[in-house]
Image: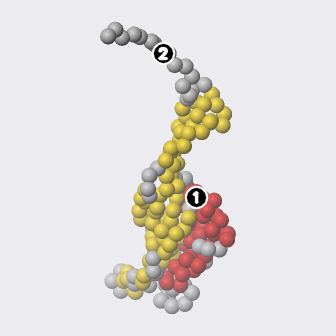
Amino acid sequence: MISWVAVEDALHAWVVAGSGLPASKVVWSQQSVARASVPFVSLRIANLSRQGHDWLEVVDAPSPEAGAEIVHRSRGPRQLTLSLQAFAGAATGSLAAIAILEGIIAAANLPSRRDALNDAGVGVASFTPVLSLDGIVSTVLFEPRATIDVLCHVTSEVAEFGTYISTVEAETFTVDL
């Protein structure tokens, strides 16, 4: 299983650091809460897919007990798409939606951000181009917006305990021909 809390926390911390916005202005979308005031960035895990085949590893249990001497670990790579949308109150300057997203992209390679993402098991692979999606709010208010998708790699792992075969009873028999 993917450590979702660690992954989400690391992604959120990266976006906060890169956007320059307070943590309260970097929000996960699809929540039952009031919309944040601009500027803000919304995060959403848009999809998750298995890459290749999972593999099974069998190792000795660290603290073996009767019936649980070994651990079966099923592991496999996953690819997720993180969709970011920046909502800005200004169409230009450092708080423009495109500028906010560019700061997030740039921060991904900083050692502190990269290390924190790696510690959570997240590898940032690529970015789509930043796309301006300006919109109208309440039929009269122009709202600068921009979006980007970030391709990330994570690993899924599940485990269960098992046992060695300790005894085998074999019976011999003869066949008359």
Identify the residue at image location x=32%, y=10%.
Answer: 177
Q: Is residue 153 above or below residue 92?
A: above
Q: Is residue 106 visible?
A: yes
Residue 38, image x and y in percent?
A: 50, 79
The colour scheme applied to this rendered structure is secondary structure
SS under mark 2: loop
Label 1–label 2 contact, CB within 8 A: no
Task: Tell me the kind of residue under disc 1.
Answer: Gly
Q: Residue at x 51, y 91 (%)?
A: 92
Quarter of the rendering containing residue 176: top left
- Label ID, residue 170: 2
Nearest to the observer: residue 54 or residue 106? 54
Taking the view exactly as shown, the residue that stands out farthest to the bottom is 92
Residue displayed at 56% across by 64% down: 123
| Residue visible at 54% across and 32% down in the picture | 162
In the picture, residue 100 is in which quadrant? bottom right
Q: CA distance from mark 1 to mark 2?
A: 47 Å
Which residue is nearer to you in this view: 127 or 19? 127
Question: Of the residues tagged 1 and 2, which is closer to the observer?
Answer: 2
Marker disc for residue 141: none
Instruction: Say if 96 sits above or below 66 in the image.
Output: below
Q: Which residue is mark 1?
A: 121
Depth order, front residue of 30/14: 14
- Residue 102 versus residue 114: which sits nearer the camera? 114
**Residue located farthest toward the front when viewing the structure as drawn:** 177
Dot 1 or dot 2: first in sequence order is 1
| Residue 18 at x, y percent in the picture | 59, 75
